[in-house]
Image: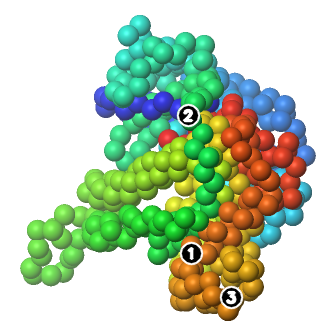
Amino acid sequence: MIVLEFKAYPNQHQEKAIKEAIRTAQFVQNKCLRYWMDSRGVAKKEIFRYNTSLRAEFPFVKDLNSHACQVSVERTWSAILRFYANCKLKVAGKKGYPKFKKNARSVEYKVSGWKLSNERKHITFTDKKGIGRLKLKGGYDLHFYDIDQIKRVRIVRRADGYYVQFCVRIERTETIEPSGNAIGLDVGLKEFYTDSNGNAEPNPRFYRLGEERIRFHQRRVSRKKRTGHSEVSSDYARSKKKGSANRSKAINRLSRQHLKISRQRKDHAVKLARCVVQSNDLIAYEDLRVRNLVKNYCLAKSINDVGWYQFRAWLEYFSKVFGKVTVAVNPAYTSQNCSSCGTTVKKSLSTRTHACQCGCTLDRDHNAAINILNRALSTVGHTGTNASGDLASIWIGENLSKQAGSMKEESPRL
C-alpha cells in the first residue's frame, strides 16, 4: 500500500463542510469508545451495530458517508485491540488505555463517497456534508493507477491547508544490483549515526536550529492585551485573548513552524534511509526503545529532535522495496564491549574514545557499530545476495518465518 498526497484548495464554504465532516467522524469515534467503556466485553459487531443506531439517531451523522463512519469505528476498535494486546503481553508501564479524541484532523472514506474527474485533477465528495468538488495539486499522476486500486481517501487538515491522500493498493518493488556490503549503524546524539566502516553522518538538529523562531511565535501566542497603562505599544494593542482572531493567527504561525521542522526531519530520514539501503545488502541497527529513553529529562529534547524511530521505519520500508535485509539487535553492551577481543570496558557517556588493553583504540560509536554488525551476522548467518524483500526486520531469538514482513502494508505515514 502506498500513499499519494495532493494539496487541496477548498473555498470558504468547503472548508466549513470539511471541518464539519471531521467533527462528525470524531463524534462517532468518541461515542463508540464511550459505548465500549460503559459496556465492557462488547464485541466488534456490537460496536458496528451501535454505529448504525447513531446514524439513525443523529441526522448530522447520517449526512456523513457510511464508510467514513465505519472507518471511525475501526479506529476505535484498533485502539481497543492495542490496549488488550499490551495487557496480554504485560508491557511495562502504561498499557495505552484508549482515550477520547479531542482535536481530530482527518476524515477517511473508503471506496464510496467520492469520485475522481476524468483528468484526475479534481475529486468530488458526494455525501451530504456539502464538500463538493476540490482541485488537486501534486507531483503524482493518478492515471498510472486504476480506480479499483484506490482503497482509501483521506482529507487531512494541517497548519498550512488541506490535503487529500489516496491509499493505493500496489506492491512497490525495485530491482538493483547487489552491492555485497553489510553495515552496522550506531545512532547517537553527537552524530546522527556512525557505521561500522567508521563513516559518520552529522546530526542536523532541525529543532535546535528553529527553536528561536518557535520561542518567538510562542511568545506571540501567550501575549495578552495590556490594560491600565498610559503607554501601550502597537504590538500589545492587538488582543491575544482566547477565542480572538489574532490569537488564532498566532497559533497558526506557531503550528506552521512546527510543521516545517517535522517535514525537514522526515525528508532527511527518507533520503538517508534510501541511500543506506541502496548501498548495502544487510543493515544492522539497535532495537532501541525510544519511549523509555525520552524519560531522561536531560536528553529528551535532543532524542526527540534526532528522530531515530522515523529513520528506522524508513529503513525497514525501503528494505522491502529493494529486497534487502534489516536486522534489529539487542543494544545491550554494544558500547562497552570491545569489538576486537570482546572485553568489557566500562565508560560513561562523556567518554567518547574506546581504549582496550588489547590495543584496540576506536571512536566509541565506531566500536559500537562494529559490535552491532557482528551480532547481526551471528544471528542470521551468511546471507549473501539472496536477501528477500519479504525478510524485512529480524529480532534476536525470533523465528525468521514469524518476522517476515508483507509487501501489502502502507508506507510510513506521509
Left of 217 or right of it: where is 264? right
Q: Earlier in the sequence, mark 2 or mark 3?
A: 2
For residue 117, side relative to residue 25 (left or right): left
- Disc 2 versus disc 3: nearer the observer: 3
How crowded is the residue under tag 3: few (<14 C-alpha within 10 Å), some, or many (20+)?
few
- Coordinates of residue 408 in the picture (x, y in percent): 69, 30
Badge 3 amino acid: Cys
Q: Secondary structure at mark 3?
A: loop
Indicate which label's residue lies in the foreground, 3 or 1: 3
Residue type for callout 1: Asp
- List x then y, in percent, for residue 202: 42, 67
Residue 358 shows which numbered tag? 3
Residue denoted by label 2: 176
Tell me the distance, in whole angstroms, between the alpha carbons under discs 2 and 1: 30 Å
Q: Which is more N-terminal, label 1 or label 2?
A: 2
How many numbered circles are shown?
3
Q: Inspect the image, locate mark 2, and give the three-letter code of the amino acid beneath it.
A: Ile
Q: Is residue 340 visible?
A: yes
Reading the image, the residue beneath label 1 is 365
The residue that appears at 62% across and 46% down in the rendered structure is 180
Circle 2 packing at 10 Å, graded few (<14), some (14-19), many (20+), is few
Q: Give the position of the N terminus as an image quadrant.
A: top right
Q: Residue at x 69, y 32 (%)?
A: 407
Front disc: 2 or 1: 2
**Mark 3 to mark 1: distance in Å?**
18 Å
Asked if labels 1 and 2 touch by Cβ distance under 8 angstroms, the answer is no
Residue 183 location, x and y as percent? Answer: 61, 58
Q: Residue, x 68% and y 63% (percent of image)?
A: 373
